[in-house]
Image (spheres, grey):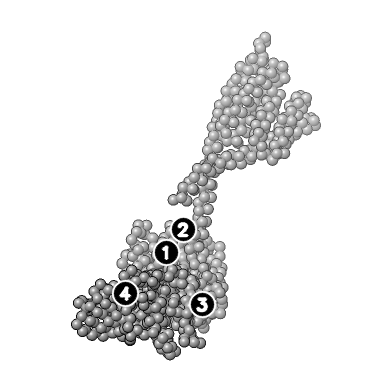
Amino acid sequence: MEILKKRDGDTLEVSVIGPLDTITSPQFEDELTLLLDNVKHLVLDLAQLEYISSAGLRVLLAAQQVMGTQGSLTVRHVPDSIMEVFELTGFIDFLTIE
Amino acid sequence: MKLFTSMKDKGIQHEPSVHDDVLWQNEVLANRHTATIMCCCGIAALVAILLTAVGIFTDTSHVVYRSCISALIWMVVPSLVCFHFKCTKRWMKYLLLVCLIVASARVDCGLGYIAMFCMLLPVVFSIRYYSFTLTLGIAAITTVVFAITTYWGAATNFTPVDLNLVEEGANYASDVMVYSFLPKWLIFILIAGVCAQSAKRGRAMVFEQARISHEHSRVETELQTASQIQLHALPVASELTDGKDVCFDLATSIIPAKEVGGDFYDFFYIDPTHLALVIADVSGKGVPAALFMMISKVMLDSSAQNSKSPAQVLTAVNRQLCKKNEDHMFVTVWLGVLDLTSGELISANAGHENPIVCHADGSVDVIKTKHGMVLGAISGVRYRDDVMQLQPGDTLFVYTDGIPEAHNVSSEMYGMDRLVAALKNKQNMPLQELVDSVQRDVDAFVGKAPQFDDSTMLALRMKGLLIREGIQVHPDYESIVQVKAYVEQQLGQASVPTKCTGKIKTSLDELYSNIVHYSGATWAEVVCHVSEGAVTVVLRDNGMPYDPTSQALPNTSLGAMERRIGGLGIFMARKLMDEITYQHVNGCNEVNMFLRIE
């Protein structure tokens, strides 16, 4: 898994390339935690997210909980297969998806 | 603890009844004994009658007739009554002894000083009943009856006159009582006292004997139970091989020299591709060896489950056995771990007999390797792994020293040469038959000499190699990457569309990481198949039984702040796959994931 970061003032855009699973999610969480200082708007670009398991969802949930108090979280370019996971887990209800 | 209490209780309850039983058995025997002798006395009386009738006995014939006929009645009748009831009535001893008193008294007053020992008869007979009070009671009754009959006999001149006591004008009857009966009675009462003491001592001896035999039978029973427990602690070859598609055959034989022994064999799967084989011999024999054997067996078993290096296992078990070994027991062990997929056998030897390999061409090799120290002797000793290769058709034969060191009557040893000869060219003999034939050969050699040591054998024949698909791993964190790579490769080879691979990889990640984190398994296997428009992934592990399909579904309608992730993964896998099934087979969890390719 790789992540690409783009900082623009208080907006941070992060693109995830590869899977978010048991192996990669802890690494993603560590990197994301370091980046969130002074960020008001977090945008996650999932266009190249291969698949996501519950370990990845846990990081998304944590990010949503942090950004919910600190500003906003937007998820964009969600592939169909990932959208299906969001739907069946109910994440679609609280994530802001573009 | 409960077992001990109940056994103790039993003992307390049993003691009196055991005594009663023993006394009763003795009483029946004593009745038979007494009745038989009384019958014989009756026959003697009959002989006396006959001898008088033909004129050999010249005593006054009517006296003989009267005495003997009355003896016949008082001796033979009660004996016949006794035999009629098979000597098993409580009142019988009183009947017999009282009749004996009467008969003796009758003879005594009929014959006078000629029959002076008659008075002792009933008391002597009563000893056999081992009762102090009975003997004294009989002595008392005898005293009374004899006093009366002696006086009556003297007064009526029924008893022949003792000329020593006849004085002119004196009272003959009272003289008889004072000068004849009284001294006789004093001697009698002395002898009766000795008899009563003998009866008492006899009773104590009978009780002691009963206690010893009871104790003996209790120990016997306990040893038998221990022997059963020990035997059941050993695995059964057929449980591993019968009706199963396995690439090997197993056969065993164990003959302890005593009820319980110190030899044992063991075999068990470390994982589905590795079989551990153990043969061991504890120093000494009997109960101490058996106790040490159980400890060693459990330690070897649990240590071997976690390591494929026999040397490591022996090192660890040796350290544990040395810890509390004040009695200086030790055990020789040969431990092998066989890789069923390759036939590679890694083994370590702690002072045990060399293993033998019987090849498919009928030739036999004794595998000589460097031996380590016996287990339990010196702490901190290291052992060495030796590697050998078993080919399909090869038979591994391990045994304890009871086989080569079996002695015959002329103190010759069976020896390795005979053992090797017994194993030669037996490649086609069914394995259990081979093991039994070796035992028969040893038995024939030993002949009538007693068996000194336990004799134990374990044989394994490779029928072929185990072919396994998929990937077998130790389910640790690192293995997740291996498993993922394997499944990705399988899916890639079959060009499964990305839409499906994502679902499969997500579900696999959930279910496999669950095994890694929670199952406690030491082994896991993943097999991925793509065929006929569907993907099947099978996950097996030897951890705690866990059925993912029976878990409660999480609440997916909560907002971000109330959410917990627990249970979500399994839920996702169940939703993403077309079907997930679970079964628990051979102590393993088996989860099947099924997805149709769209």
Q: Is residue B279 visible?
A: no
- Label 4 – label 1 distance at C-alpha: 48 Å
**Residue that carries the numbered disc 1 in the rendered image:** B298
Give left or right: position of B505 versus B364: left
Given the current orientation, which residue lies at the most extreme right position?
Answer: B54
Q: Disc 4 on helix, strand or loop? A: helix
Quarter in which the C terminus of chain A is drawn: bottom left
Judge the density around disc 3: few (<14), some (14-19), many (≥20) Cα neighbours within 10 Å.
Answer: some
**Residue that carries the numbered disc 4 in the rendered image:** A61
Give whichever of A48, B60 is nearer the camera: A48
Residue B439: x and y, percent?
Answer: 54, 69
Which amino acid, mark 4? Leu
Give whichever of B187, B405 is nearer the camera: B405
When asked about the image quadrant of residue B345, the answer is bottom left
Q: Cβ–Cβ below 8 Å for labels 1 and 2?
A: no
- Given this view, does label 1 or label 3 mark the residue nearer the observer? 3
Which amino acid, mark 3? Val
Q: Cβ–Cβ below 8 Å for labels 4 and 2?
A: no
Q: What chain is tagged by disc 2?
A: B
**Residue that carries the numbered disc 3 in the rendered image:** B246
Q: Residue at x 56, y 76 (%)?
A: B430
- Label 2 – label 3 distance at C-alpha: 36 Å
Q: Residue at x 25, y 83 (%)?
A: A13
Quarter in which the N terminus of chain A is drawn: bottom left
- Given this view, does label 4 or label 1 mark the residue nearer the observer? 4
**Residue that carries the numbered disc 2 in the rendered image:** B286
- Given this view, does label 2 or label 3 mark the residue nearer the observer? 3
Judge the density around disc 2: few (<14), some (14-19), many (≥20) Cα neighbours within 10 Å.
Answer: some
When asked about the image quadrant of residue A81, the answer is bottom left
